[in-house]
Image: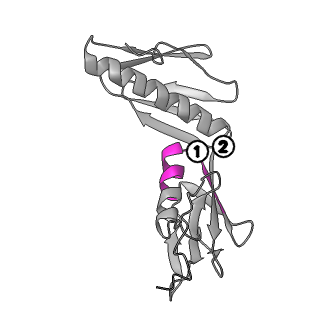
Amino acid sequence: MSKISKLPIEVPSAVTVNVAADSVSVKGPKGERTLPVRSEIKLSLDGATLTVDTTEDSRFAHAMRGTMRSLVSNAITGVTEGYVKKLEVNGVGFEVDIKGKTLILKLGFNMPKKFEIPDTVTVECPTLTNIIISGVDNQQVGQVAAEIRKLRKPEPYKGKGIKYEDEVIKRKAGKAFGSGG
């Protein structure tokens, strides 16, 4: 049985949690999230403590118990602190800009790439080479960051492309010059 699922979730004072039969809604200072709850899972709220339990004794129900506990815990973290992913654009002439709800990326192609920003996240460009993606849903923030990075992944020879801020690119040596044969 999962050790994580047995742990109760401490609900901060700034967060309100509403538990229904088939959903749980979490509302905090940064926003609101609603999660569906499977029929095998039972959530109970006692004051500032939320516990996750199963309604049946099956292997699948115990697996879903741990998953649901993690999802609710991540939702509480999202509405209190939020999630942030930072991207860096490396390369000569590579730059990013925001026009309305569109991210315009100049990545060395003949035309700039355009990326439509979804309503669930906020994207900022403090400099021409940095992108900050933030939101209350961890999955959405990570998905948008991955889609932007996929437009021009970093290459191993010069490191040109879009990379996460803490990502380390393994560099390759390249061709050696002067092999007169």
When the figure is inspected, residue 106 is found, relative to residue 62, above or below; the finding is: below
Q: Position of residue 15 (x, y in %)?
A: 64, 29
Q: Residue at x 57, y 62 (%)?
A: 171
List x then y, in percent, for residue 113: 51, 78
Q: Is residue 106 magenta?
A: no
Q: Which residue is mark 1?
A: 136
What x and y, as percent, mark residue 123? 62, 61
State the separation of the CA atoms marked 2 and 1.
Answer: 7 Å
Viewer-side label of 2, 1: 1
**In the rendered image, which residue does mark 2 sit on?**
30
Q: Is residue 67 above or below residue 136?
A: above
Q: Is residue 118 above or below residue 58?
A: below
Q: Is residue 29 left or right of residue 74?
A: right
Task: Name the residue rendered at 27%, 12% in the picture.
Answer: 56
Q: Quadrant of the N terminus?
A: top left
Mark count: 2
Q: Position of residue 115 (x, y in %)?
A: 51, 71
Determine contact: label 2, label 1, CB under 8 Å: yes
- Residue at (51% x, 84% y) in the render: 109
Q: Which residues are magenta?
A: 131-144
Q: 44 or 62, which lies in front?
A: 62
Query: Is residue 162 found left or right of 14 in the rendered image?
Result: left
Q: Secondary structure at mark 1?
A: loop
Which residue lies at the image location 70% right of the left edge and 24% below the top edge?
Answer: 13
- Specify the amino acid type for callout 1: Val
Type of the residue with mark 2: Lys
> Helix or strand or loop: what does disc 2 sit on?
loop
